[in-house]
Image: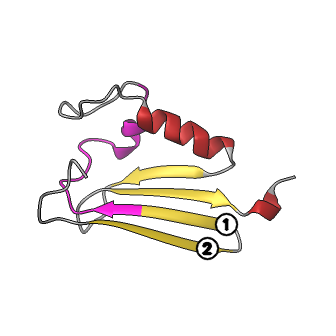
Amino acid sequence: MRHTPANGTVTVTIGRDDAGAAIRVDDTGPGISGDPERVFDRFHRAADSGGSGLGLTIARQLVEAHGGTVVAANPPEGGARFTVTLPSADTFV
């Protein structure tokens, strides 16, 4: 929300298919500068983030520990997009 303009939007979309669930968060902010995947690097942070640079690293580790993926991107229409996919419960042994 910090990087979305006052008149912008943050949209959360949740879907499900046979493989599992997907959670997508899109915003209408300026997008992610440089390589979007770098935001998951430990201690990588934007100059104005005010954070420690660990949050997204921890989020990715948690998602991957549950057999899922998390991806950051700059969609062609602008803004930033984060997509989390998690396998369905019946894929666990």
Residue 43 image offset from top left, x and y in percent: 37, 24
Q: Few, some or many C-alpha atoms within 10 Å of disc 2 (few <14, some 14-19, many ≥20)? A: few
What residue is shown at x 59% (from left), y 40% (from top)? 62
State how the image is colored. secondary structure
x, y (%) of residue 78?
23, 63
Q: Position of residue 60 (x, y in %)?
A: 53, 41
Q: Residues within 10 Å of mark 1 (few under 14, many from 20)?
A: some
Residue ID for mark 1: 20
**What residue type is disc 2 on?**
Arg
Which residue is labeled 2 in the image? 16
Left or right of 50 in this view: 84:
right
Labelled pair 1, 2 in contact (Cβ < 8 Å): yes
Q: What's under tag 1, amino acid-wise? A: Gly
Label 1: which secondary element: strand
Magenta-tinted stretch: 25-42
73 on left or right of 68: left
Q: CA distance from mark 1 to mark 2?
A: 6 Å
